[in-house]
Image (tube, grey):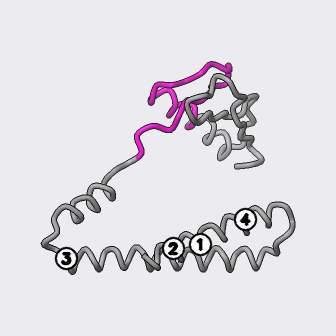
Amino acid sequence: MFIMVELLGKVKHKKEACRGWKQGQVAWEEYRETVRAAREQVKKAKALIEISLAREVKDKKSFYRCVSDKRRTRENGGPLRNETGDLVTQDMEKAEVLNDFFASVFTGKSLSHTAQVTEGRDWENAEPPTVGEDQV
């Protein structure tokens, strides 16, 4: 339990350092060192969990819970807007919008639109974030 509290503290410190770096209050090197420390701590925690699972093989419930967590994939990426501004929710249409956008980045063609991604369930009430070619 001590490791989890320490890990949560490292991750929180990493988020604070990121916020401080974006605001210009933290140096890049300090931010990178914080990120490295948090990443190292997360790797150690994952390794300890796997070692404890290996030691307690007879506890099938926790083993299969861990296996199912690792096998779980993200199903949906949220709705997108195409170049005409229409909301796209079907998987194939979303794939085409993303393919057109990223293909234009690699081919050098400039599109008149930017890919807009909306996340969450209240996307109708808020302006969706916009990702431009210069940000990719």
Amino acid type shown at disc 4: Cys
Could you say whether the residue bearing mark 3 is in a helix, strand or loop?
A: loop
Query: Marks 3/4: CA distance?
Result: 38 Å
Residue bearing mark 3: 56
The vertical placement of 62 against 121, above or below, is below
Q: Comparing marks 2 and 3, which lies closer to the viewer?
A: 2
What element does badge 4 sit on? helix
Above or below, comparing residue 3 to residue 60 in the picture: below
Most extreme residue toward the right, as rendered?
A: 24
Q: Earlier in the sequence, mark 2 or mark 3?
A: 2
Q: Which residue is mark 4?
A: 18
- Residue at disc 1, secondary structure: helix
**Mark closer to the chain start, 1 or 4:** 1
Asked if residue 53 lies left or right of residue 115, the reply is: left
Q: How many angstroms separate mark 4 from mark 2 (CA)?
A: 20 Å
Q: Amino acid at mark 3?
A: Glu
Q: Are marks 3 and 4 in contact (CB under 8 Å)?
A: no
| Residue to which mark 2 is pinned | 5
Quarter holding residue 114: top right
Q: Residue at x 63, y 37 (%)?
A: 101
Q: Where is mark 1, residue-wise?
A: 9
The answer to which of marks 3 and 4 sits earlier in the sequence is 4
